[in-house]
Image (cartoon, helix red, strand yellow):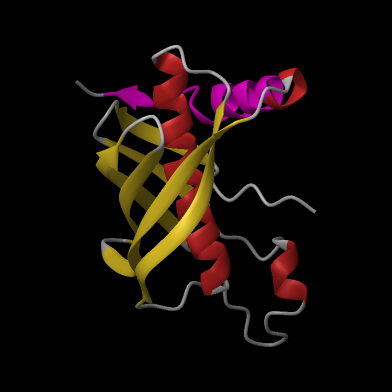
């Protein structure tokens, strides 16, 4: 199973930050077992959603600069803290801010909030690897096009 944990990108400021969201619903498969009678969204999936947003952001920037075959791979998680339980019906706002970025690695400060209250915060480091696979590139472009169709671009 593949989890797509970013429903939409709302705002993007290239080379600075990206904002997206995840609407948590009782229909998410994870709630079958986590936990019956008291469904909470696992911290590991919150972290994964933040990593998907930040990693995709680095790839989008590299594609915009003509570097199309590099993929973001999460390599270090620093100081990830979970401060609030996330339940079905919550809408998490994800934000990733670039702290460092070059052709070999990127560092992003990430946070997830619900109605202005922080539920997770941390720092993620990614390494970039060249993977030349046309089907992977096409798949990524399709996901980015879908998730970013209404994204507001900020200068």
Q: As drawn, is 122 to the left or to the right of 87?
A: left
Measured from the top left, where is residue 66 in percent x and y?
45, 11
In the rendered image, the residue lying farthest to the left is: 155
Numbered range of the magenta stretch: 137-153
Q: Is residue 143 above or below residue 115?
A: above
Q: Quadrant of the N terminus?
A: bottom right
Query: Can the viewer see residue 15 in this picture?
Result: yes
* Image spot of residue 145 (x, y percent): 56, 21
Between 83 and 86, which is closer to the camera in this rendering? 83
Residue that sits furthest to the bottom in the current view? 37
Query: Image quarter for residue 139?
Result: top right
Can residue 88 be seen at all in this image of the molecule? Answer: no
Coordinates of residue 153 in the picture (x, y in percent)? 30, 22
Q: Nearer the viewer, residue 142 or 58?
A: 58
| Residue sitting at the far top | 66
User: From the viewer's perspective, is 81 left or right of 149?
Assistant: left
Q: Predominant secondary structure in magenta?
A: helix
Relative to 65, say whether 104 is above or below: below
Question: Is-magenta flag for residue 136?
Answer: no
Measuring 43% from the left and 23% from the top, which residue is drawn there? 62
Return the residue nearer the eye: 11 or 52: 52
Q: Residue at x 27, y 29 (%)?
A: 15
Q: So how many labels did they put on this image?
A: 0
Q: Nearer the viewer, residue 23 or 136?
A: 136
Please check the rendered image and state whether residue 147 is part of the magenta-colored stretch, yes or no: yes
Which quadrant: the C terminus?
top left
Q: Residue at x 73, y 18 (%)?
A: 134
């Amino acid at each position: 199973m593949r989890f797509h944990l970013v429903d939409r990108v709302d705002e993007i400021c290239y080379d600075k930050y990206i904002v997206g969201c995840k609407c948590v619903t009782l229909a998410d498969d994870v709630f079958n077992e986590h936990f019956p009678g008291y469904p909470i969204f696992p911290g590991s999936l919150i972290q994964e959603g933040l990593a998907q947003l930040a990693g995709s952001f680095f790839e989008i920037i590299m594609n915009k600069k003509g570097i199309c075959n590099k993929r973001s791979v999460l390599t270090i998680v620093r100081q990830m803290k979970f401060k609030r339980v996330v339940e079905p019906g919550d809408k998490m706002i994800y934000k990733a801010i670039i702290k460092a970025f070059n052709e070999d690695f990127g560092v992003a400060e990430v946070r997830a909030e619900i109605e202005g209250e922080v539920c997770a915060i941390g720092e993620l480091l990614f390494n970039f690897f060249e993977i030349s696979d046309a089907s992977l590139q096409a798949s990524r472009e399709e996901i980015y096009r879908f998730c970013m169709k209404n994204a507001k671009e900020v200068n």
